[in-house]
Amino acid sequence: MNAGGFMVHRIEKDSTRFKQIVRSRIRKDLRKYITRGELIGRKGKYLVSIPLPQIETPRFRYGPKERGGVGQGEGEKGAVIGSEGAAAGPGAGDQPGEHILEVDITLDELAELLGEELQLPNIEPRGASRIVAEKDRYSQIRRSGPESLRHFKRTFKEALKRQIASGTYDPDNPVIIPVREDKRYRSWKTAYKPESNAVIIYMMDVSGSMGAEQKEMVRIEAFWIDTWLQHNYKNLERRYIVHDAAAREVDEDTFYHLRESGGTRISSAYNLCNQMIDAHYSPEEWNIYPFHFSDGDNWGSDDTQGCINLLRDELLKKVNMFCYGQVKSAYGSGKFIKDLQESLDEEENLITSEINSKDEIVDSIRAFLGKGK
Amino acid sequence: MNLTPELNYIRDEIEGYARGYGLDFFNVIFELVEFDEMNEIAAYGGFPTRYPHWRWGMEYERLSKGYAYGLQKIYEMVVNNDPCYAYLLRGNALVDQKIVMAHVFGHADFFKNNYWFSRTNRKMMDEMANHATRVRRHIARYGREKVERFIDQALSLDNLIDYHAPFIRRKEEKSKRDLEEQEEEEPHARRLRSKPYMESFINPAAALREEEQRMRQKAKQKKRSFPEEPERDVLHFLQQNAPLERWEQDILSIIREESYYYSPQAQTKIMNEGWAVYWHSRIMTEKALLDSEVIDYADHHSGTLGVRPGVINPYKIGVELFRDIEDRWNKGKFGKEYAECDDLDEKRHWDKKLGLGRKKIFEVRRIHNDVTFIDSFITPEFCEAQKLFIYGFDKSTGNYVILDRDFDKVKQKLLFTLTNCGQPRIAITDANYKNRGELYLKHRHEGVDLKHDYARDTLKNLGAIWRRPVHIETIVEGKGKLLSYDGKDVSEENIKVRKEEEGPKDGSS
């Protein structure tokens, strides 16, 4: 029996099939993952790990909790030897399939699944043709160059070729000595690639009427927006603005956990957003996505009018799209969304969406990202 | 075999030592493989030629990940076959290869000589390849999705076999048709002997009629009950009786055959590993080890025997028990006289210089499995020396805690986890439930509930194969439950569970 080559192909097929199954399971349950927000916190830099207990083959068998067992080692009666959860009991490894299977998929794959499931169009970056970056790639071989870039293998091969051709190669004493003509060097080629930069500016109302549940919804939605835009843009920046009656920039963590009280002046956030764009993100070079979440209870119609003017005259001209998501709260009139819709009806890149419960997050994501801008 | 000349030399040397000690095995063929090939073969359960299925891929991913993160490394793998195949990891230190070889010869001896392996197919390498060919043919003809779905369903039942079936003939082979063709005999009530004038008093006609009526009813019931005796080999029963297409029957038979092939390994995990460790340690420390390798050997060896609280390490417990047995039989620490001795000090220094230890452990490896091994040889002294305990889950804290170190309880729990390979005992009791061709299974509850969500999903898979409603009777949190699947939903119903007398009754029908 030969343990070599051919077997590697064999497992590859089974592995591929396994990955296919995993993908389809995740896709099937994607809405559940979205609404429950359980993937947040399972995200690493490139990978998300997703628990998939249902992929294990079920059998009639005992559960570890019910079963208990025999162990070996020190410890008094009552001493703790393991806990449920991460280790899935002390018997982990002792019985097959007692760990919950977690599969890692890349953020990119997850975004693709999201795109497939919600039928999101790929984003057509603005200004893609205009924004070009240079990049050097070592993809060539030359006959001259600095010694530090010498390609050892190629040089050796050339020398070998020459020695065989000239009959100076002796198989019994295979010494290869490269001369200057044999030497080969790596060399680079400059590639021009359209660069796609994007910035997401998250804004959130942190006035008293926004509770923990509202913030959770915002957080889940932001997670998926991040994932999708990350998939579409190589270079993605995020900025966070909170506001009540006044606005300020904060970091991501503060953004989700800050709780203020007091009134709401939405124009303060829009102003800050506008300044931020002007200072750092020229629309020529950046794809700009402001997202604003609020419970829609603004302080006075003057301020709302100010917001509308600012959107119409400044923001909407600079951004790819401006998304306003209104989460439902027990307080407040929720009037802001209606005002926006009435006054800025004809603006194509203003997207509004109402999120009344976690179940509506999926539709809201689709509303925001479904335009492909 | 693709060993380097050096490894080949070592192999021959170690084989010589092993045979010198009296180990007896089929020819062992070593293959040198890279780590990814090792992971691959391990994912296939030791056979590089398994039928295509995604779960090997899943296992491969898991092993590769474990290897990549440095969590685990498979040193050795050995396949019960004639010849015996064993895999060595290329790039391991020479001393590691020596240990692995010595260890492998231990396993090879166990495979060949242990009674529980005596009915396994020794040409399994070829058989697995045949299985793969058959499955591929079915896939080509019926489509991957369809075949895969059926395999998934059938795998869900692969532990529902009768682990002792290869050794016991439970009943005469019979088909349903034979039963129907059986001549119907009119029952006759037994008459008591009596004088003619007393006849009508001793054997009153009415009572006789009643008795005959009852017997007729019973016979009818018996004829109707199918299977006649509870059937534990569910896979076999389905293969024979479920409305399956030929290819589906074939898949079932493949899965069943592989289940039976692997079952002795599950039944002798502790013994098999213990035996292999015993011999690698003997061969290495007495013969094969060079001075310069001592530290590395000790490091590797202690890694193999390391214990974590809450997990029984079969290597550790196995080798310790073999050594204990050897010691006891060397010193004569067994039998009536020793058992009845009350003097602890005398017992401790007991030594009759019998020297029977070696002979005894060879006998033990021949006839025992884990259950009988533990049952026959574990002693309170051993239990204490090995610091064994039982643990359980404490619902109030969510922790697993040590419950007891009492010898009898430890032994009982250990035996429980090993009996029936730690699988619940489930049998088909009625294949014509409610006279509607529904399948009725009974779980013999032994104090531990089934994993509930799994039970529900498994029932669905069973239903998909039986194609009629299926039921399983079990106990959940002390209450009798009947789980039923009607092809759409799983329902649960509270029922009264009758305590039943154990085992199949005398099969004299």
Image (spheres, helix red, strand yellow):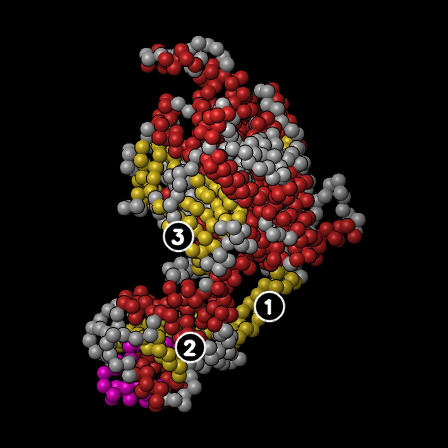
Chain identity of mark 3:
B
Q: Nearer the viewer, mark 2 or mark 1?
A: 2
Q: Residues within 10 Å of mark 3 (few under 14, many from 20)?
A: few
Task: Classify 10 Å Cα crowding around label 1: few (below 14), some (14-19), many (20 and above).
Answer: few
Residue at coordinates 59% horizontally, 23% vertically from top-left?
B23
- In which quarter of the view is residue B255 placed? top right
Q: Residue B328 placed where, x, y %?
A: 44, 17
Q: Reading the chain from its start, which is encountered first: label 2 or label 1? A: 1
Whether residue B397 is situated above or below residue A354 in the rendered picture: above
Q: Is residue B276 above or below residue B441?
A: above
The 10 Å Cα crowd at callout 2, few under 14, some 14 to 19, many 20 or more, is: many
Using the numbered discs, state the Cα–Cα distance from disc 2 to disc 1 in whole angstroms.
40 Å
Residue under pointer 1: A189
Left/right placement of residue B404 relative to residue B427 reads left
Q: Quadrant of residue A21?
A: bottom right
Looking at this view, is B34 or B434 the one in front? Answer: B434
Secondary structure at badge 1 equals strand
Identify which amino acid the numbered label 3 is placed on: Glu
The residue where tag 2 is placed is A368
Residue matched to label 3: B493
Assess whether residue A294 is covered by the magenta stretch. Answer: yes
Looking at the rendering, the stretch of residues picked out in magenta corresponds to A290-311
| Amino acid marked by disc 2 | Phe
